[in-house]
Image: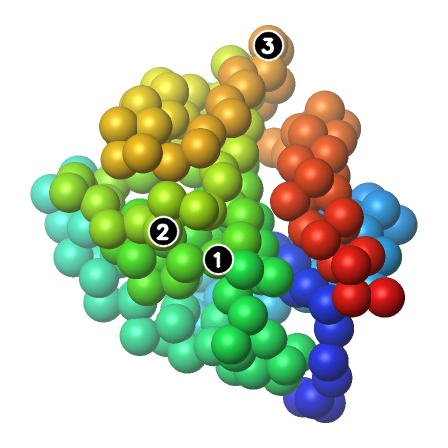
Amino acid sequence: MTDQVTDSLVILLHGVAAFGYDLDPLASVLRRSLAKTAVVAPDAPFAYEQGPGRQWYSLEGVTPENRLARIAAARPAFDALIGSLVAAHGLAGRLDRVALVGFSQGATLAFDAVARGRWPVGALVLLSGRFVTPAPFLPAHTTPVLLVHGSADGAVPPEETRRAAGMLQGAGMMVQSHILRGVGHTISPTGMKLTRRFLRERLYEAAMQFT
């Protein structure tokens, strides 16, 4: 990985059985909108057992009772990957210039990382995620959060996002939440627009101060 210094960094975290490049449409939208902001979409650390793709933790035999333990086991690899990307872009001491954007399983891990206080980043976007990290949370209250979910999501119920929004607001965080009518388990054009607008508000103008 080539070291580089940027004003800000957006890390896109894909869902299960996917690769980083599956988020290229969203990455392209963000790169056109965010000046001097690096947008990266790494592959998850682990191979998907049932076919091509990568995963943040295994879904084989997963249950509501063991899901949290699997997320806990995935934390070291997740943290190592995020840490390497942040360091490579010269932002190890400037997490306020970093945003995590997770879709589906990627959102689950991003939520866990921020809610537990491990990554007090400058912005968090959670798209169609399932959220099982229990309270009490230890987040940086300065991390604003955007949650987006489709009302017709057949893979992860939109109630997950409604519940997460309430929990994060209860923890004192700034939260925006959108349930998109008729949208399934995907990042829709509207979801991309909401993400772009949110990150522009949180990163773009601040990044321009350094130009």
Residue mark closest to the camera, 2 vs 3 = 2
Q: Amino acid at mark 3?
A: Arg
The residue at 30%/57% (across/down) is 117
Answer whether labels 1 and 2 touch (C-beta < 8 Å): yes
Check the picture and name the quadrant holding the C terminus.
Answer: bottom right
Residue 92 horizontal side relative to residue 161, left or right: right
Answer whether labels 2 and 3 touch (C-beta < 8 Å): no
The residue at 70%/89% (across/down) is 3
Residue at which label 2 appears: 140
Answer whether labels 3 and 1 touch (C-beta < 8 Å): no
Q: Could you say whether the residue bearing mark 2 is in a helix, strand or loop?
A: loop
Check the picture and name the quadrant holding the N terminus.
Answer: bottom right
Q: Position of residue 185 (x, y in %)?
A: 55, 29
Cα–Cα gap, marks 3 and 1: 29 Å
Can residue 165 be seen from the camera position used here?
A: yes
- Quarter of the view holding residue 173: top left
